[in-house]
Amino acid sequence: MKSYEKLLLENKAWAGIKTASDPSYFPRMARDQKPEFLWIGCSDSRVPANEITNTEPGEMFVHRNIANLVVHTDLNLLSVLQYAVEVLEVKHIIVCGHYGCGGVRAAMTQNHLGLINKWLRNIKDVYRANRSEMEAIKDENKKVDRLCELNVIEQVNHLAETSIIQRAWKNHKRPMLHGWIYGLNDGIIKEITVVEPNAPIDPLYTFKFDNE
Ligand code: CO
């Protein structure tokens, strides 16, 4: 059997088990989604959003990219964000990084990786913004792990800097923003930052919505 054929077989088995234990499961799923959470995580295959939070289909809206970045020109992420905030009305947005992230590690090198250089450039900027702290850490793995944490904090800040979030804060007092980090070694998620609705942010990035 080809490796991908196993996936299709497993899918049939899974659907069968779900239906057997709850015949209304798929009809209910097919009707609507109303997830309370938007998850922004790394594409790394070892950090599956639903599995590590023990959530079911329908509970979490998910966006994943290399190193869980929130880039203010990324139409993909911004579309997911706008839909999650304005249509699904999520209460919480979680940026979840992970220790030992390959994207973060690569950003600390001078390796030329083609197109991905441009993506990883965003992480180099996080390093530069925290240069003195980063350069005080001598152990290479500890350095990577600290940059993984600082990267999550920076991406949460990027969310708060979007007009999508600021408008939702002003009008609906949601969503709350969370920065989490997952340990590949122990499977535990650690909370590293939380930003409440209407938390003060750098005035340079604050929008006024007087004309709305
Ligand atoms: Co990663």
Image: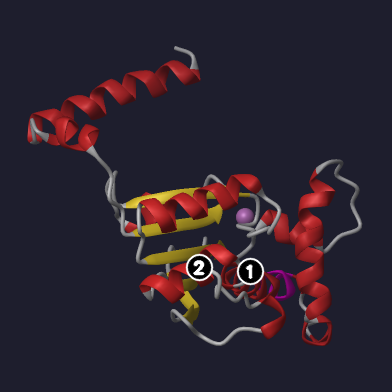
| Residue 181 visible in the snapshot | no
Going by the numbered disc 1, the residue's amino acid type is His
Answer few, some or many: residues within 10 Å of disc 1's Cα (few below 14, many 20 plus, some between 14 and 19).
Answer: some
Name which quarter of the figure residue 100 lies in.
bottom right
**Front disc: 2 or 1:** 2
- Residue placed under numbered mark 2 in the picture: 212
Q: Which residues are magenta?
A: 141-145
Name which quarter of the figure residue 76 lies in.
top right
Q: Nearer the viewer, residue 57 or 15?
A: 57
Q: How far across and down, in percent of the image, does residue 32 sit?
A: 25, 40
Q: Secondary structure at mark 2?
A: loop
Going by the numbered disc 2, the residue's amino acid type is Glu
Residue 119 appears left or right of 167:
right
**Rendered position, 17 above or below 54:** above
Q: How far across and down, in percent of the image, does residue 64 sit?
A: 55, 49
Mark 1 or mark 2, which is nearer the start of the sequence? 1
**Rendered position, 35 above or below 209:** above
Q: How far across and down, in percent of the image, does residue 12 sit?
A: 27, 21
**Outermost residue toward the top?**
1
Q: Nearer the viewer, residue 80 or 9?
A: 80
Answer few, some or many: residues within 10 Å of disc 2's Cα (few below 14, many 20 plus, some between 14 and 19).
Answer: few
The number of discs equals 2
- What's the CA distance linking mark 2 and mark 1? 23 Å
Residue 83 appears left or right of 60:
right
Q: Secondary structure at mark 1?
A: helix
